[in-house]
Image (cartoon, grey):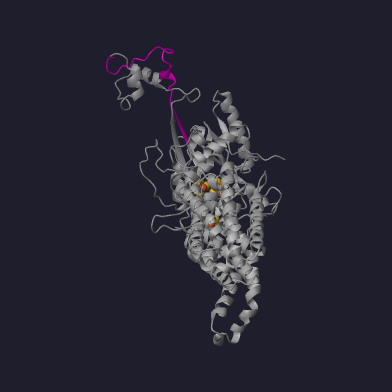
Amino acid sequence: MVPEATFTSYYGRAIVKPSPWEADIPAYLFAGGLAAGSSLIAAGADLTGRPTLRRSGRLGAIAALSFSMVALVHDLGKPSRFLNMLRVAKLTSPMSVGTWILSIYGPFAGAAAGAEVVRMLPARYRVGPLRLAAYVDRPAGVLAALFAPPVAAYTAVLLADTATPSWHAAYKELPFVFVGSAAAASAGLGLVTSPLEETGPVRRMALGGAVAELLMEHRMEQSMGITAEPLHQGKAGRLMRAAKALTLAGAAGSLLAGRSRTVAVLSGTALLAGSACTRFGVFEAGQASARDPKYTVVPQRERLERDAPVRFEG
Amino acid sequence: MAGKHSLFGPVDPAADAGYDEDHPPRKGFFTDTSICIGCKACEVACKEWNDVPSDHFSMLGSSYDNSFSLNANQWRHVAFIEQPKRMGEQESGLRRQAAERAVSLGMPAMGAPPDVLKAEALRGDPPQGEVMLPESGQDDAVDRPDFRWLMSSDVCKHCTHAACLDVCPTGSLFRSEFGTVVVQDDICNGCGYCVPACPYGVIERRKGPEGAKNVGIAQKCTLCYDRLDAGATPACAQACPTQSIQFGDVEELRERANARVETLHEAGIMDARLYGNDPDDGVGGAGAFFLLMDEPEVYGFPPDPVVTTKDLPDMFRKAGLAALGLLAGVAVSFVGKRG
Ligand code: SF4
Ligand code: SF4
Ligand code: SF4
C-alpha cells in the first residue's frame, strides 16, 4: 500500500486548468488514428493486390478523416474561424503542426478515396476527366500512406505538450501507445470488412498493434509516478480497463481470425472499440489530473524536497 | 528570432520574439503580498478598465475570497488564507485599546469587543466599560495572537517562456514589445489549447455570461497593453492603495524584490520568500512575480512550474520514432508470408 500523499492546496482548488475540450477531442484522436492506419493498409493492399482491403482502407480513411475534421471544428470556441489555424505554421504548437500534417495528408487521402469511388462506377460512367482517376489512384494512395504515420503520432504530442499532469508525464511513451492503438483499430476495420483471403497482413498488424499498445501503456504507467493514478480511477479507470480487455480479446481473436469470418468480425470490432476506449481513457485521466491539485503539487513539491527543482543550467 | 534559449533558459522575451534592440524595457509586476490588505481594488479596477464581465460570484466560504480563481472573467484574483500562526512581530493592539478604554471619557467604543477579547481577555466579571487584560507576558496570545491572514493578488505571470503562447496555433497569443503576453481577440478561434498549457491555470476560454463579448475566446490579463502603449500604469497597480502591486521594469523590480525580502528577514519575518523572480526557473522567470509569506501551493500557485514546451523537442523525437515504427510495422505485416 502506498501511503496517501499529503500536500497543501488553496481550498482544494485546481491549480492548472483542465482543457475545455469535450468528447469531440478523444473522438478526433481515435478517428485520426483510424484514418492514418487505414491509409497505410490501403496502400499495402493496393501494392499486394488485395482489392477489398484496399477499398475499405481508402473509404475508411476518408470517412474517419471527415469525421475527425468535423469533431475538431465543432470543438472550437469560434468554429467560423477554423481557417485561422492556417494563418501561421508554428513548430512550437503541436496543434499547428498537426493541422499542417492533416492538410498535406488529407488531399492525398481524399484523392485516393475519389479514385476508389471511380473504380466502383460501372465502366460506362468512367468517361471524360474521370478516366484520369486511374493515373491518380496508386500515387495518391502511396503518398497518403507516407504522410499517414505523423497523423497517428502527433496527437500524442498534442496532449503531452500541456501542463495537464497525466498527459505531460506520459510524453515519452504516449506516441507509441497511440500508434499501436491506431494500428490495432485500422487493422480491426480491415478484419471486419475484408474476406479471409485478404486479411493476412491485417491479422499480423492487429496483433502487433495491440501488443505494442498494451506493452507501451504498461511502461507508461510505470514511468508516470503518482500521475498514473487517474488512469485507474473513476471514468478514466473504467475506460482503461475496458480498453485493455477489448484489445486483449481482439488480439487473441486475431490469431484465429484467419479461419472464421465471424471471429474476424468480432475481433476487429473489439480492436476498434478498444482503441476508442484507450483514447477516451487517456483523455479523461488527463482531465481528472488537472482538476485535482494533488497531481500538480505532489510531483513538484517532491522535486523541491529532493533539492532538484527544474532550473536552467548553463 | 528563435535562439538557443527560445524554449528554456534566461532570455529577453521581446528580443527573442524578434523586436529590435530599441524595444522598450520589459514591463511587469512585483506583487508584495506582505502588505496586501485584501481590499480587491485591483480586481475591481481590472474589470472596469478592461470591461471584464462579472459572473462566477457566489459565497464560497473561503474566507473573503468569493471570486474563486483566475479565469476568463477574473484577471486579478485576491486569495485569502487564514492560518493559526504568528505573522512576524505583529501585535494585536488589544492592550492599547484596553488602555484607551480605561481612561475613556464616555465616548462610545467602536462596536462590540472582538471575540478574542471576550474569550481570552475578559476573565471574571469586569466592571462594564473596563477591560481587564492579563499582565504583559502572561498570556502572549493577547499581545501576539496565533492568527494570521495571508492575502495575495494573483495575475497572469507573463512568463519569459509562455506555454500558452508557444502552443497557440493561430498566432492569436503574441509577445508584445514590452515582453508581455497578449491575446488578440479577433484572431483567436477558441481552440482552447492555451488553457491546459498554462502551468499556472491562468488563461481560460470565456464561457459566458450570455451576451458578453468574446465568448468562446481565450481571455486573460493583457498587462493593460492599451495603457502601456499610452505610457500609463496598469489599472490594477494604479488602484492598489498599499503598493502591494508594483508595476515597472522587470529588471528594476527584481532588485526591489530582493531588497524587500532582505528587509523582512532582518525584521525577523523569515517566512518571506520570492516566487517567480528567478530567470533560471522553469518558465525562465515570470514577468509578474511575488513576495509570499508561505509555500506557493498555500496560495494556489504550483511550487515548481515548468513550461511544457521545454520538453517539446523530445516529444517530437519520440513521436517521430513512433511514426517510423508504425510505417515499418505495417510494411512488415504486408511483406510477411501471404495469407
Ligand atoms: S501565466 Fe499562463 S497565461 Fe500567463 S503567460 Fe504564463 S503561460 Fe501564459
Ligand atoms: S484558444 Fe485562442 S489564444 Fe488559445 S491557443 Fe487557441 S487560438 Fe490561441
Ligand atoms: S494589468 Fe490590466 S489586465 Fe492585467 S490584471 Fe492588471 S488591470 Fe487587469
> Considering only vertical position in the picture, is A308 above or below B173?
above
Our reading of the magenta stretch's main secondary structure is: loop
Judge left or right: residue A313 versus residue B213.
right
Residue B235 visible to the viewer: no
Query: Relative to residue B250, is residue B114 drawn left or right?
Result: left
Residue B10 against residue A108 in the figure, above or below: above
Q: How many marks?
A: 0
| Residue B137 forms part of the magenta stretch | yes
Question: Residue placed at 62% from the left, 42% from the top?
Answer: B282
Among the 4 quarters of the image, the one containing residue B141: top left
Q: Quadrant of the C terminus of chain A?
A: top right
Left or right, B122 with reference to A198: left
Q: Quadrant of residue B254?
A: top right
Give x and y (percent) for residue A87. 59, 64
Up/down of A98 relative to A167, above or below: below
Nearer to the camera, A211 or B315: A211
Outermost residue on the front side: it is A259
Q: Is residue B103 above or below residue B109?
A: above
**Residue at the image position 59 percent from the left and 77 percent from the top:** A115
Region in magenta: B125-151
Q: Which sits in the foreground, B52 or A66?
A: A66
x and y percentages locating residue B228 in the rendered image: 56, 50
Instruction: Please tell me which residue lies in front, A33 or B125.
Output: A33
**Residue B105 image position (x, y, % from top left):** 31, 19
Rendered location of residue A147, percent (x, y):
64, 64
- Residue A193 shows up from this direction: yes
Specify whether residue B178 is painted magenta.
no
